Image (cartoon, rainbow, N blue to C red):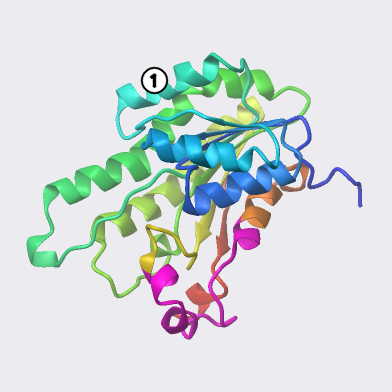
Amino acid sequence: MNDDLFSLAGRLALVTGGSRGIGRMIAAGFLKAGARAVYISARKAEACDATARELSSLGTCISLPADVSDAQGVQALVAAYGQHEPTLDILVNNAGAAWGETFDSFPEKGWDKVVDLNLKTPFFLTQALIGPLRKAATARPAKVINIASIDGISINPQETYSYAASKAGLIQLTRRMALRLAQDNIVVSAIAPGAFASDMNRDARDRADAIKARIPVGRIGVDDDMAGAAIYLASRAGDYVVGSTLVVDGGVTHAR
């Protein structure tokens, strides 16, 4: 095996929703894998700045606070990134939202907020960053990694209608984008996480004993599980993985 198969040495990455949870796990993993710089974005500037300071112990991590839930926020992030770098090797579309409510009362705003951020933003942010991605995709492919969810593959008991639909849509969008962007030497793939402790997945964080009882491997996902999957797809090891969604869930989707 070549020593650089899983290396990100010299690579530039941008991770949305990078201040906490899965985004932070991925950003930290990229830095440990040797990325030249990892830019993280999040809606809350103070949290984004704090995470960047903490992760700077691992390498160069730069905070670019932005609310990417609408076109104005997407353009603001693209402009901020462009102040630092002309190229982008790895884009991780991780920023997301969820909404849970009963069928009878589920509101339209619970669809608009979730679908806009979970499904539209990955498309329009990738579109807005296509110039830097194409510039990077010369000797080696650039990478786009969309963070989906196992809820887009199988059904959980919670009434999260727009979340499940948005993540299923993102998995299909990944396939469609991958076919087009492969022409530009940009490899698009996705990750479907299962139970990882985070502010969004409070059950995995606060009810770990109950949740892990339903997971075949008997535990909640840890930081290295997510970082390893993202490093694989972002590195040379994942260059031939095009349009696929890597399920990282301890076997839950097979057990449901």
Helix, strand or loop under label 1: helix
56 vs 168, left or right, is right
Foreground pick, 216 / 10: 10
Residue 256 in which image quadrant = bottom left
Foreground pick, 162 / 39: 39
Q: Position of residue 220 (x, y in %)?
A: 53, 73
Q: Residue at x 67, y 43 (%)?
A: 30
Q: Residue at x 73, y 22 (%)?
A: 138
Mark 1 — residue? 75
Foreground pick, 28 / 142: 28
Compared with residue 64, is residue 79 higher up or lower down, i.e. above or below? above
Q: Residues within 10 Å of mark 1 (few under 14, many from 20)?
A: some
Q: Residue at x 33, y 51 (%)?
A: 166
Callout count: 1
Q: Position of residue 36 (x, y in %)?
A: 72, 30
Q: Which residues are magenta?
A: 203-226
